[in-house]
Image (cartoon, rainbow, N blue to C red):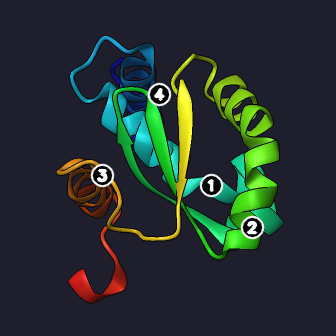
Amino acid sequence: MRGQDPKSKFSMSSEVLQKLFESGKSPLSEQFIRWKLWARWSEFVGPTVAQNTEPVGFSRGTLYLWVRSSSWMQQLTFMKDHIQQTINQKLERQFVKNIRFTLDRREVPAGSQEEFKNVIHKMAPDESDR
């Protein structure tokens, strides 16, 4: 390791941490996977669906999605299984067992939404925190 580039060491360390978080063996694994899903939402569901939905909570295998309108909610009901399969395929695990849609961001199990937002905020603070 002597004489090794510091950037290379950092890169190796970050890869190890990512693998640990993704393995499901760390207490932070679920939060990391939720953050990854949130951060890459458009990549997971496509730009059109992403513009009309937002993940607002996760509890006991159920992903709660806020939906822009009732017509979008109707359309997404037909796409629910496909969205769930796509998410699980991209995450390479059976993370999402169910999806629930809501027009009201507050209709999420107590603590789920706030915990989800707090984890994301800690991992990726917004511009006002800098």
Q: Of marks 3 and 4, which one's residue comes earlier in the chain?
A: 4
* Image location (x, y in percent) of residue 106: 32, 67
Does residue 125 sit above or below 96 in this rendering? below
Residue 18 in the figure: left or right of residue 26: right
Does residue 119 sit above or below 30 in this rendering? below
Mark 4: few/some/many CA within 10 Å (<14, 14-19, 20+): few
Q: Look at mark 3 in the image and give the residue it sits on.
A: 116
Q: Callout 1: helix, strand or loop?
A: helix
Residue 96 in the figure: left or right of residue 34: right
Residue type at mark 1?
Trp
Q: Which mark is residue 72?
A: 2
Q: Of marks 2 and 1, which one's residue comes earlier in the chain?
A: 1
Q: Which mark is residue 41?
A: 1
Asked whether the viewer can see residue 14, the reply is yes
Distance between mark 2 and mark 3 Cα atoms: 23 Å
At a point 35% along the width and 60% down the height, the residue shown is: 107
At a point 61% along the width and 53% down the height, the residue shown is: 40
